[in-house]
Image: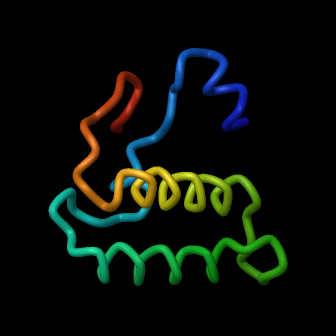
């Protein structure tokens, strides 16, 4: 679904909202939130959810690619 969203104009979810951290969160807080959510939503875990797992991975990779600098909201981001 991420590829479809990208093809449809980049309708990505706000990575900070997905990870549940504030935009000014330190790198360690972002990494900690990522790890917690990956363990929670991993498809092999009892609370697994493949779509949420992929959202978490995508959000983290987006922030990591930006070297954990604040990412400006994109069209379609937010609640």
The image quarter in which residue 48 lies:
bottom right
Give residue 38's position: percent from left, percent from top: 61, 75
Residue at 51% across, 83% down: 36
Q: Quadrant of residue 32?
A: bottom left
Residue 63 lies in quadrant:
bottom left
Name the residue at 64% across, 57% down: 52
Residue drawn where x is 36% and y is 22% of the image: 75
- Which quadrant would the C terminus be assigned to in this image? top left
Q: Is residue 36 left or right of residue 17?
A: right
Q: Residue furthest right?
A: 44
- Residue at 25% x, 37% y is 72
**Residue in front for this viewpoint, 15 or 71:** 71
In this rendering, is residue 62 above or below 24? Answer: above
Could you tell me residue 53's position as x and y percent?
66, 63
Nearer to us in this view, 63 or 55? 63
Tell me the quarter of the image containing the N terminus: top right
Percent position of residue 33, x then y:
41, 77
68 sits left or right of 11 in the view: left
Q: In the rendered image of this protein, does residue 61 appear above or below residue 6? A: below
Question: Is residue 57 or residue 41 the one in the foreground?
Answer: 57
Q: How is this picture coloured? A: rainbow
């Amino acid at each position: 679904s991420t590829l479809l969203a990208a093809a449809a104009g980049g309708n990505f979810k706000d990575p900070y909202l997905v990870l549940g951290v504030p935009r000014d969160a330190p790198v360690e807080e972002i990494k900690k939130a990522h790890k917690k959510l990956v363990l929670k939503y991993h498809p092999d875990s009892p609370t697994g959810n493949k779509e949420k797992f992929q959202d978490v991975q995508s959000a983290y990779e987006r922030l990591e690619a930006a070297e954990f600098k604040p990412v400006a909201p994109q069209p379609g981001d937010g609640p």
